Image (cartoon, grey):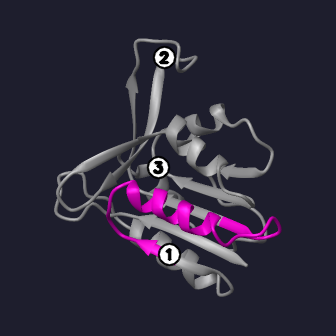
Amino acid sequence: MKYLFSYCCNYKGTENQLPDCELDGKRLISKLKDYQVTSYKQGSPQLLVDFINNVNQVVKPDDTVLIQFSGHGSQYRVPSTIEKDGYLETLVFWDGNNYTLLSDKTFIKLTDSIKCKTIVIYDSCYSGGFNALVGTDKIIRSTAVKGELFELELNPVRSASKKC
């Protein structure tokens, strides 16, 4: 089986509104006809936790889980040696009222717990910092969509101008 968790948030109605994140999700979902899709346009990181808990109850080692995040990323200085560069990267979730940050360390711990091959696609500021913590070979992480699996038309102008 193949499973997709897609969180693509435009942050509508906020001063931090982004264009086309929801379109990113719609485009990917339209290409992955053989995936069981769980899709959100807003919500807290608990959505991802619940998805992983549920999928871990049914996946087999030869299944595939694809996680897509298109939205805001952030970074802040931490006063310890948690990160070699001194900055913690986060994904920014929006539930319609509040922002919730999910740290790279927590995100990787969550995705490392998935009991099958896992592919992660990030489209957010500072997402490249997530790869620095990867300690497993079973998870494929990308900040860009490449290869034959994802034949999507990407708009590099929008991607290059996405504000954090």
The residue shown at (60%, 81%) is: 36
Q: Amino acid at mark 1?
A: Thr
Using the rendered image of the protein, determine whether residue 152 is visible from the camera's viewpoint: no
Depth order, front residue of 157/26? 26
The residue tagged 1 is 38
Label 2 SS: loop
Q: Residues within 10 Å of mark 3 (few under 14, many from 20)?
A: many
Whether label 3 touches label 2, CB < 8 Å: no
Question: Eyeballing the image, is 28 above or below 19?
Answer: below
| Disc with the residue nearer the chain's start (2 vs 1) | 1
For marks 3 and 1, give the CA distance: 20 Å
| Residue 115 x/y as whole percent | 72, 58
Q: Which mark is residue 123?
A: none
The residue tagged 3 is 124
The residue tagged 2 is 86
Identify the magenta region: 38-65
Q: Amino acid at mark 2?
A: Gly
| Disc with the residue nearer the chain's start (3 vs 1) | 1
State which quadrant residue 135 falls in.
top right
Question: Eyeballing the image, is 72 above or below 34?
Answer: above
The residue shown at (78%, 50%) is: 138
Is 103 positioned to the left or the right of 130 in the image?
left
- Quarter occupied by the N terminus: bottom right
Label 1 SS: strand
The residue shown at (65%, 81%) is: 35
Magenta stretch encompasses residue 51: yes
Whether label 3 touches label 1, CB < 8 Å: no
